[in-house]
Image (cartoon, rainbow, N blue to C red):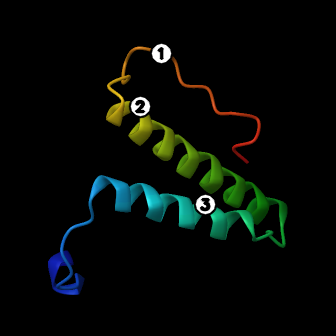
Amino acid sequence: MYQSFMSEKPPLSDAEVYDLLHRLWLHAAAEKGATEFGENTLKTVRVSLFALQAAMVMKSEGLTGQMPFEPSPHSD
């Protein structure tokens, strides 16, 4: 069922996925929630997107599982 909504575009490369995550992070970083819940949700989205980007970098550099992940204070 999900495939029927997918476009006919070719699959994204890892670099394109990373770039997409970054664009999503920039979009989320530019927004503010009207409520505490909304703001906390946006903060969670930003931290999650940052973590996914970091995981992609670690995987591409062969570092997965070799060091603990701790988000930068600048990730939000």
Label whose residue precedes the other's in the sequence (3 or 2): 3
Q: Residue at x 22, y 85 (%)?
A: 7
The image's mark for residue 67 is 1
The residue beneath circle 3 is 25
For the residues labelled 3 and 2, the Cα–Cα distance comes to: 18 Å
Q: Nearer the viewer, mark 3 or mark 2?
A: 2
Q: Residue at x 34, y 33 (%)?
A: 59
Expressed as whole percent of the image width and height from the top left, the position of residue 36 reads 83, 60
For the residues labelled 1 and 3, the Cα–Cα distance comes to: 24 Å
Residue type at mark 3 is Trp
Residue type at mark 1 is Met
Badge 3 marks a residue whose secondary structure is: helix
Q: Nearer the viewer, residue 46 or 38?
A: 46
Which quadrant would residue 31 be assigned to in this image? bottom right
Q: Nearer the viewer, residue 69 or 36?
A: 69
The answer to whether 56 appears left or right of 22 in the picture is left
Which quadrant would residue 66 be assigned to in this image? top left
The residue beneath circle 2 is 58
Q: Nearer the viewer, residue 51 or 40?
A: 51
Expressed as whole percent of the image width and height from the top left, the position of residue 2 reads 20, 76
Q: If the image is split into quadrants, where does the N terminus sit?
A: bottom left
Q: Residues within 10 Å of mark 2 (few under 14, many from 20)?
A: some
Expressed as whole percent of the image width and height from the top left, the position of residue 71 reads 64, 33
- Please, is residue 69 above or below residue 53 in the view? above
Badge 1 marks a residue whose secondary structure is: loop
- Please, is residue 29 above or below residue 10 in the view? above
The answer to whether the residues at label 1 and label 2 have Cβ atoms under 8 Å apart is yes
